[in-house]
Image: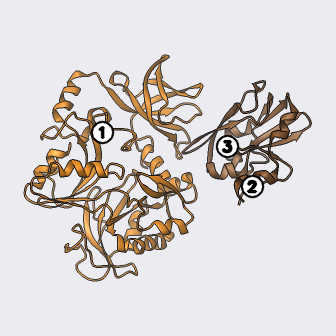
Chain colours: A orange, B brown
């Protein structure tokens, strides 16, 4: 079982640990609802070092990325982060990922933890002479998420991150934390030009990205520096209401925003046409699986992923049946109680003809039929 | 360490029973509520429901999980704790008091001898 470099910190914080995709991860520290509300109202720090990290660079690496990704990557400027699906030749989603443009023909791809081995094989199988580095167990990633995240980051670094736009990234030194920082060894961080110039401090790639629907940052650093960064975030974050948050809150936060969970909302048999969001596919370029998507879209007969809001007490869960006028029409893929709305929320697949917002369905919760309405995501809007 | 009250009887599924003449009042133990974490939804048995020992009485849900609650004895459900519908957190705050789940009119009080003493339940918990 893998342990992130911050593992011992979680134990000393009294976290409840859980096996997740081969990693021993904190599911909660004090309570899922408390951590969830903490992120919505102030901010939270998540150890997401279990996510993968691939560096792909060299001649025509941009062409390779465009071939693999449903969204166009190559045309984007350095520093841009792109959310994309990666499909097999039948159009089925192998994984969803964020690709960061590091330079011309140089990219960072972050696959999900559970899919990292599969994605490594897939990407390596399509490499034609480019360099491929799997740094998944050499790099840590800490997500700082919530309305006060920007204030926390300002106390970690002299680099001006307030100007960093949503879905952009920048290399920086975290020079306001007590640690001197190790000298970077990974190809991601070694020898980079930093936003705040050379000097002391932990070298990191800071992205304005996340999985909570809040403003926030993801900080990728070397394993050797991870504990220093984690401690500095918790220490300086305290004044901004920041607390550590586990995978439990991460799941409820993403579900309130209608964000997909790899392996749960798509499990290898669905396409991007089925899951959406519509902007995840850039139809102007060619990519693996495109033809299948075009055909499926034209056929008009497929199941579509929808968001459902419960209209009565009850909590939909993964695997529960969805009914329409007594007929079984689909299955819930994700469900929980929304800590913000205090109502059951769910995602699941129904025939595309029933996918319009406003459609009434029932979710079978054990012996009870829970009335629910198909709604447009997100369940929880930003203030 | 979980609270185990000496005057109650216990099941291996982490339910407790308080005997009130012919009535067995039951709920989930402190250990169970700690393991489940924040309880957000409770499904209660209807009054008048006939149950056998080991039957599913209802469900207790946290954000992450659903957990079945089993009847520790056979009999008829006299009453269930309606307060839990709007205040499921009572199960966390006061599992042996305000967080009781159901009161069952026992059909076979001899079944009580099959339940664990506080001593035995502590051993089961390894505490």
Instruction: Answer whether residue B43 is visible to the viewer in this image.
Output: no
Discs 2, 3: same chain: yes
Q: Chain of mark 1?
A: A
Q: CA distance from mark 2 to mark 3?
A: 28 Å
The one of A307 and B112 positioned closer to us in this rendering:
B112
Which residue is label 3 attached to?
Answer: B88
**Dot 3, how many residues are within 10 Å of its Cα: few (below 14), some (14-19), or many (20+)?**
many
Q: Secondary structure at mark 1?
A: loop
Q: Is residue A50 above or below residue B44?
A: below
Residue lying at 57% horizontally and 55% vertically, measured from the top left: A31
Residue lying at 31% horizontally and 60% vertically, measured from the top left: A136
Q: Position of residue A260 (x, y in %)?
A: 37, 42
Q: Chain of mark 3?
A: B
Picture quadrant of residue A352: top left
Which residue is label 2 attached to?
Answer: B123
* Callout 2 touching callout 1 (CB < 8 Å): no
Q: Is residue A361 left or right of residue B45?
A: left
Q: Secondary structure at mark 3?
A: loop
Q: CA distance from mark 1 to mark 3?
A: 36 Å
Which badge, 2 or 3, comes first in the chain's sequence? 3
């Amino acid at each position: 079982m893998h342990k992130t470099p911050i593992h011992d910190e979680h134990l000393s914080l009294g976290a409840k640990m859980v096996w997740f995709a081969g990693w021993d991860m904190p599911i909660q520290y004090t309570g899922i609802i408390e951590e969830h509300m903490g992120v919505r109202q102030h901010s939270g720090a998540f150890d997401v070092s279990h996510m993968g990290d691939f560096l792909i660079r060299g001649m025509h690496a941009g062409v390779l990325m465009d071939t693999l990704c449903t969204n166009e990557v190559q045309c984007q400027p350095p520093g841009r982060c792109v959310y994309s699906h990666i499909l097999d030749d039948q159009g089925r989603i192998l994984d969803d990922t964020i690709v960061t443009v590091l330079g011309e023909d140089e990219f960072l791809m972050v696959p999900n933890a559970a899919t990292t081995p599969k994605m490594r094989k897939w990407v390596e199988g399509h490499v034609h002479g480019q360099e491929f580095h799997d740094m998944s167990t050499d790099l840590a990633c800490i997500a700082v998420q919530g309305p006060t995240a920007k204030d926390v980051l300002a106390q970690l670094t002299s680099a001006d991150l307030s100007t960093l736009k949503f879905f952009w990234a920048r290399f920086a030194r975290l020079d306001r934390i007590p640690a001197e920082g190790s000298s970077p060894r990974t190809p991601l961080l070694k020898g980079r030009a930093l936003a705040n110039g050379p000097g002391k401090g932990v070298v990191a790639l800071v992205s304005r990205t996340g999985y909570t629907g809040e403003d926030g940052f993801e900080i990728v650093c070397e394993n050797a520096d991870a504990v220093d960064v984690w401690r500095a975030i918790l220490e300086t974050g305290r004044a901004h209401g920041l607390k550590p948050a586990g995978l439990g809150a991460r799941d409820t936060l993403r579900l309130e925003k209608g964000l997909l969970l790899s392996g749960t909302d798509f499990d290898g048999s669905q396409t991007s046409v089925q899951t959406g969001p519509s902007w995840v596919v850039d139809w102007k370029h060619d990519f693996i699986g495109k033809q299948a998507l075009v055909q499926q879209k034209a056929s008009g007969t497929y199941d579509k992923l929808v968001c459902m809001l419960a209209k009565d007490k009850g909590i939909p869960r993964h695997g529960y049946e969805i009914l329409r006028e007594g007929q079984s029409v689909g299955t819930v893929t994700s469900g929980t109680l929304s800590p913000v709305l205090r109502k059951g929320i769910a995602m699941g697949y129904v025939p595309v003809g029933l996918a319009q917002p406003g459609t009434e369905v029932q979710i079978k919760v054990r012996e009870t039929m829970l009335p629910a309405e198909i709604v447009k995501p997100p369940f929880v809007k930003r203030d | 360490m979980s609270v185990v009250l000496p005057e109650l009887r216990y099941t291996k599924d982490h339910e407790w029973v308080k005997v009130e003449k012919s009535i067995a009042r039951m709920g989930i133990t402190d250990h169970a509520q700690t393991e489940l974490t924040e309880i957000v939804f409770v499904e209660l048995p209807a009054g008048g429901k006939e149950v056998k020992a080991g039957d599913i009485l209802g469900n207790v849900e946290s954000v992450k999980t659903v957990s079945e609650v089993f009847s520790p004895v056979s009999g008829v459900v006299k009453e269930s704790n309606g307060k839990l519908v709007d205040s499921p957190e009572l199960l966390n705050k006061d599992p042996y008091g305000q967080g009781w789940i159901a009161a069952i009119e026992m059909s076979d009080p001899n079944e009580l001898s099959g339940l664990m003493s506080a001593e035995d339940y502590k051993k089961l918990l390894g505490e």
